[in-house]
């Protein structure tokens, strides 16, 4: 287990389930936009899939754009996340999206992108130290946004550190029960 990958996946999944309940949204119906396609983003999305998010409703972007079927520069890990729809920009993918997961870099999300999301949008801008959109800006943009960052100086922190030592404590107890 790697804390940045799997710890972030576990904590963001718990946050997603809670946010979906608050937003009164069904996990199998949400459109998810992901900025970042590294190990953490991939682990998060795989766990979201196991919880019920539909693969066709996930739009994952790396530094070169949407991961889609016509791209020839994808490694085997990224190919798993291919979106079969046409290539779209990050900004266009936000239109009517229910969830944004950011594990990329600061400043890639603009207020108009948040404005274009569905009712009660869930925004997890987790890049550190600078989130994809600043917490205060997101709150000023929409009064119905459910917003979290990876920073401890903002409310609603979603960060792998929240799971420690509990994840490892649970894993070690599980192992000891097998002995």
Image: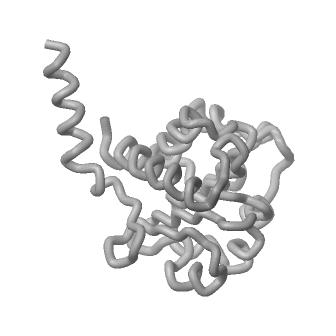
Vertical placement of residue 5 versus 113, above or below: above
On screen, residue 72 versus residue 12, left or right, reads right
Residue that appears at 51% across and 49% down: 17
Q: Nearer the viewer, residue 8 or 139?
A: 139
Extreme residue in the right direction: 86
Give the percent coordinates (x, y) of residue 140.
Answer: 60, 86
On screen, residue 55 versus residue 164, left or right, reads right
Give the percent coordinates (x, y) of residue 139.
Answer: 57, 81
Q: Quadrant of residue 129?
A: bottom left
Vertical placement of residue 116 versus 168, above or below: below
Quadrant (top left, top right, bottom left, bottom right) of the C terminus = top left
Q: Nearer the viewer, residue 127 or 174?
A: 174
Q: Nearer the viewer, residue 138 or 24?
A: 24
Residue that appears at 65% across and 34% down: 79
Residue that appears at 72% across and 72% down: 113
Residue 70 seen from this side: yes
Residue 74 seen from this side: no
Give the percent coordinates (x, y) of residue 70.
Answer: 81, 39
Vertical placement of residue 1 versus 58, above or below: above
Give the percent coordinates (x, y) of residue 1.
Answer: 31, 35
């Amino acid at each position: 287990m790697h804390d940045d990958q799997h710890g972030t996946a576990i904590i963001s999944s718990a946050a997603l389930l809670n946010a979906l309940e608050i937003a009164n949204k069904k996990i199998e119906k949400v459109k998810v936009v992901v900025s970042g396609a590294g190990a953490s983003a991939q682990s998060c999305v795989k766990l979201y899939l196991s919880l019920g998010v539909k693969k066709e409703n996930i739009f994952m972007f790396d530094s070169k754009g949407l991961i889609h079927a016509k791209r020839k520069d994808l490694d085997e890990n990224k190919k798993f996340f291919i979106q079969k729809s046409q290539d779209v920009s990050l900004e266009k993918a936000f239109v009517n999206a229910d969830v944004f997961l950011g594990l990329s870099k600061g400043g890639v999300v603009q207020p108009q992108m948040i404005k274009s999301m569905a009712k009660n949008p869930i925004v997890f801008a987790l890049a550190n130290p600078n989130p994809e959109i600043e917490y205060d800006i997101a709150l000023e943009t929409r009064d119905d946004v459910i917003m979290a960052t990876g920073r401890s100086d903002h409310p609603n922190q979603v960060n792998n550190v929240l799971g420690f030592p509990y994840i490892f404590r649970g894993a070690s107890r599980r192992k000891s029960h097998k002995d």
